[in-house]
Each structure stands twice: as C-alpha cells, then as structure tokens.
Image (cartoon, grey):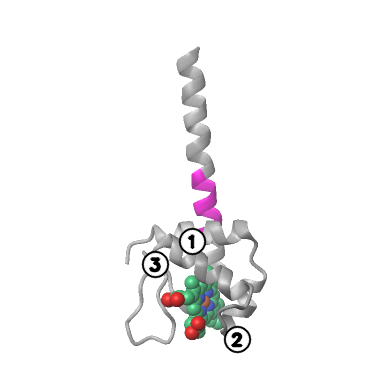
Amino acid sequence: MKLLLISIMLLGVSTAQAASIYAGKAKAAAVCSQCHGVRAISADAPFPPLAGRDEEYLRMALKQYRDKTRVSDIMNNIAGSLTDKDINNIVNYYSRQSK
Ligand code: HEC
C-alpha cells in the first residue's frame, strides 16, 4: 500500500513537469520560434538564440522585458502578455533544448 502511494506520487510529479514543458513548447512554437528558432541559430542572426541557455538568465530577461526595465520594442510587447506561469513554462522548455 505504501509502495503504491509512493508510485502514485512519483507519477504525479513527472506528469506535472511534462505538462509544463509541453505548455512551454506550444507557446515557443507558436510565438517565440518565429524569431528565435527552437535551436541555436547562426551567430550573426539578428535574434539571440534561446535554446540551451541558462534557465535563470532567461527568466530574468523575460521579467525585465515584461516590466520594461529592459527596453526592446519587440520584446516589451511580447513579454507584456506573459504570466509568471507562461514564463516558467517557456524557460523550462528552452533551457532543456540542446544548442
Ligand atoms: C518578432 C520577433 C520576436 C519574437 C516573436 C520573440 N522575440 Fe525575443 N527577442 C527579439 C529580439 C529582436 C531580441 C533582442 C532585443 C534586445 O536587444 O533586447 C529578443 C531578445 C530576447 C531575449 C533576451 C536574450 C538575451 O540574450 O538576452 C529573450 C530571453 C527572449 N527574446 C525571449 C523570447 C520569448 C520567450 C519569446 C516568445 C514568448 C520571444 N522572445 C519572441 C525578437 C523576438
């Protein structure tokens, strides 16, 4: 019985994590990848790559764009409509992609 409970809990944790990466992937594919790609793009491209970047860095950058402490016409607009949950899902996804 105890073992069953533990496996149910483990299952719960892993599906919750999968769901957030999935939500991040959907958002990234629909919005972000149009400019940033999914994997790293060439160094001279106008858009900085996001794949495989540090999760904390990406989270900080998006929150700064959202509250406009970092200025970019494009990114201020895009990040303005993201919730904390969206940001977590997206950075979770991008930081786990290989470069
Ligand atoms: C229309 C094009 C466009 C779209 C769509 C877009 N971005 Fe950007 N993004 C840019 C540009 C241009 C910059 C560089 C702006 C600057 O100088 O700050 C940038 C910068 C960034 C940075 C900072 C990277 C760094 O190296 O500091 C992050 C993080 C980022 N975008 C995340 C996202 C996410 C997440 C999405 C989807 C929700 C997204 N962007 C959608 C154009 C776009």
How many residues crowd mark 3 within 10 Å: few (<14), some (14–19), many (20+)? Answer: many
Marks 3 and 2 sit apart, C-alpha to C-alpha, by: 22 Å
Could one spot residue 34 in this view of the protein?
no
Q: Which residue is nearer to you in this view: 10 or 65?
A: 65
* Element type at mark 2: helix
Query: Which residue of the protein is positioned furthest toward the right in this rendering?
Result: 81
First along the sequence among labels 3 and 2: 3
Q: Is 20 one of the magenta-colored residues?
A: yes
Is the residue at mark 3 in contact range of ligand 1, meaning its CB lies under 8 Å from it? no
Residue type highlighted by circle 3? Ala
Q: Circle 3 is placed at which residue position? A: 51
Q: What secondary structure prevails in the magenta region? A: helix
Residue at screen point 61% across, 79% down? 76
* Foreground disc of the pair 3, 2: 2
Mark linked to residue 73: 2
Mark linked to residue 91: 1
Residue at screen point 51% across, 67% down? 60
Marks 3 and 1 sit apart, C-alpha to C-alpha, by: 9 Å
For residue 52, above or below residue 5: below
First along the sequence among labels 3 and 1: 3
Span of residues in magenta: 17-25
For residue 4, above or below residue 25: above
Residue at screen point 62% across, 78% down? 68
First along the sequence among labels 1 and 2: 2
Quadrant where the C terminus is found in the figure: bottom left
Q: Position of residue 45 (x, y in %)?
A: 38, 86
Q: Quadrant of residue 94?
A: bottom left
